[in-house]
Image (spheres, rainbow, N blue to C red):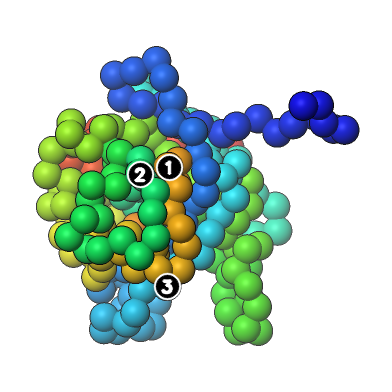
């Protein structure tokens, strides 16, 4: 088959211990999924999970042992970090049960849901979609994906983010309001999940703005580190 314009390149993410890469299908993100972050954003309680999406080419893969360059986007004066555990789906399905959900996970990675907070805030006030605040180019940095069998006890792993050596975010994955299995199960009632889907599971408290020149180091126990510099 030939195309009338050049076909887009398939985005993919490095895999720990392999020369092969993980092809990205869709990117789903979970909103306000840590209690402390929900509170800092003016919400409380275990509300029903809600989701938004980023285009698959928003991924900014950062190979192990390197520092990725994160471009400061246009149209914002409040570019904020959100440190997250990312779930990589290896087996698709719909209406997945909680008890079976983890069998659909291929692996886990460290990710950042980068946000134009001022743009997102303006959209919220007007009841408009969040895409301009959330779904722009390079808004989904991600480190190598570690196969689930090699990732250790991810469900109870510590999650941290340092900016210029200062601790900004610190929590544990077991503080998720909706855990990984529950998130997969609920998401699969709205969408038929596919191999290659990535789920950004939510961020702890401590989200804040970054500037050009800032250095970010995210870590999740068992998954290594994700290093970025804002340029």
Mark 3 to mark 2: distance in Å? 22 Å
**What distance separates the C-alpha of mark 1 from that of mark 2?**
5 Å
Which mark is in front, 3 or 1? Answer: 1
The image quadrant that residue 110 belongs to is top left
Q: Element at badge 3?
A: loop
77 vs 148, nearest the viewer:
148
- Name which residue lies at 40% across and 76% down: 41
Residue at x-position 57% and y-position 75%: 121
Contact (Cβ within 8 Å) of mark 3 with mark 2: no
- Height in image: 82 above or below 59? below
User: Does dot 2 land on a helix, a strand or a loop?
Assistant: loop
Q: Is residue 221 above or below residue 123?
A: above
- Residue 103, percent across and down? 23, 47
Q: Which residue is mark 1?
A: 195
Residue 130 % position (x, y): 60, 68
Q: Residue 131 location, x and y as percent?
A: 63, 63
Quarter of the picture holding the C terminus: top right
Binning the other alpha carbons within 10 Å of mark 1 as few (below 14), some (14 to 19) or many (20 upward) gives: some
Residue at far right of view: 4
In the picture of the structure, the residue carrying the numbered disc 3 is 50
């Amino acid at each position: 088959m030939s195309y009338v314009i050049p076909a887009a390149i398939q985005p993919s993410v490095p895999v720990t211990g392999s020369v092969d890469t993980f092809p990205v299908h869709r990117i789903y993100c979970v909103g306000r999924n840590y209690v402390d972050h929900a509170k800092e954003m003016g919400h409380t309680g275990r509300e029903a999970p809600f989701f938004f999406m980023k285009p698959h080419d928003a991924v900014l893969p950062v190979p192990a042992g390197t520092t990725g360059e994160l471009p400061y986007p246009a149209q914002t004066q409040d570019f904020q970090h959100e440190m997250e555990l990312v779930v990589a789906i290896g087996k698709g399905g719909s209406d997945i049960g909680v008890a079976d959900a983890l069998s659909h996970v291929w692996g886990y990675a460290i990710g950042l849901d980068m946000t134009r907070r001022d743009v997102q805030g303006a959209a919220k006030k007007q009841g408009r979609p969040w895409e301009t605040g959330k779904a722009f180019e390079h808004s989904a940095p991600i480190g190598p994906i570690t196969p689930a069998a090699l990732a250790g006890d991810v469900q109870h792993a510590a999650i941290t983010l340092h900016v210029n050596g200062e601790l900004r975010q610190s929590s544990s994955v077991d503080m998720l309001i909706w855990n990984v299995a529950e998130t997969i199960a609920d998401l699969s009632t709205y969408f038929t999940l596919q191999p290659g889907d990535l789920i950004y599971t939510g961020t702890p408290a401590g989200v804040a703005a970054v500037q050009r020149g800032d250095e970010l180091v995210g870590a999740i126990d068992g998954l290594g580190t994700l290093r970025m510099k804002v340029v």
